[in-house]
Image: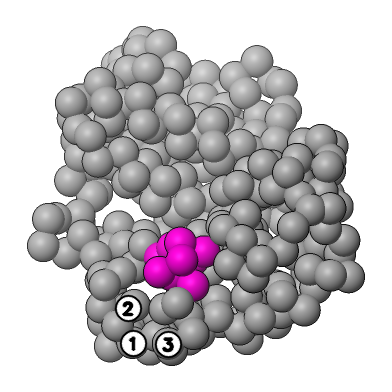
Amino acid sequence: MLTSTEGITSAFDSERLQSRIIQSFLAAGISETYLADDISLALEFSLQKSKRKEKIFTLSEINNSVVRILKDTGFPEIAAIYLRNNACSQLTITPEFNTIKKVLQKHLGVNLNSIDELSGKVLSAAQHLNIENAAPELFVELAKHYETEDFASEDIEPVSLDAWEQDNRWLVKAKALEDELAISTRNLIDAKVIRLTGVSGMFPSIRIFFMINEFCRFHGLSSPLTEMVLMPYLFSAGKAIDNCIATTDCLAAKAGQEDLPIFITIPDMSSFAAQMLDASWPEVEKDCREMVIPLCNSLSRSLFKLKLS
């Protein structure tokens, strides 16, 4: 859940975040917007793995994390554009305990038991450095620096990201991965049922796209479909996807990456619902998720995220 600067709480929306990042890429004249997907997934993965007891984060935390990832991966110009379009207004404040406390509560979401001690450390540092006024971001960065191990569980733990460069864009390329797959799996790739992206150097993960309409055409299935008819076919699809996962795991391990999170996207589920189930989307989304459970259960490792659209 996210808390806005106005105190409004809403669910974290990775697609909305991805759209904002893409806008910043395009504004900077960079067309490789697929990287925005990696960044939004990296951040979502960090949020899910956070040790914070309640998964509630401020919007400023999210924006600051995006800016940090963009800078760390070699896109300072995009970071500047994103910061300008999404951060709070730039202003300066005088270091005073209650002011600093409010800034840290707003931008870090530190719990009430820790905020006073942390605010005191930041104020002491500002006085020691003879800072009479500065941007709120400076005090936030000081707070991050002075957080002790007692506060560590309150952080969004950043995913380790190597600096993005042309040469290390892919740790495992899709073509190299496809060459190692079973023939039956490659047949599904040739039929455009399964699409692999390889393992990105920006956010190492296993990304698989499963086209369910093409899958039905591949097996000669026609509407109207029932769950009982589709189930055995989904088990076979699960075996093919599991072959992709196991092969990717093996190649990624050679590149020094293990236990990668798994993301499966079914991008044509809405059209499948309309054409093959004679149902309306998104009303039938819950039923569709239940329908693909056999596919997910046939995998040797659990998914981090299944996305239907």
Q: As shown in the figure, which amino acid type bears the numbered disc 1?
A: Glu
Q: Is residue 191 magenta?
A: yes
Nearer the observer, 115 or 161? 161
**Residue depicted at x 50% and y 34%:** 17
Label 3 element class: helix
Three-letter amino acid code of the residue under disc 2: Leu
Quadrant of residue 117 within the rendered picture: top right
Q: Is residue 22 left or right of residue 304?
A: left
Can residue 267 be seen at all in this image of the molecule?
yes
| Left/right of residue 31 with respect to residue 158 in the rendered view | left
Judging from the image, what secondary structure is the residue with disc 2 in?
helix
Circle 2 residue: 177
Please, what is the three-letter code of the amino acid marked with disc 3? Answer: Ile
Q: Quadrant of residue 212?
A: bottom right
In this rendering, is residue 263 above or below 302? above
Name the residue that disc number 3 marks: 183
**Mark 3 surroundings within 10 Å by alpha-carbon count, few (fewer than 14), some (14 through 19), many (20 or more):** few
Would you name the residue on which mark 1 appears? 180
**Residue extent of the magenta highlight:** 188-196
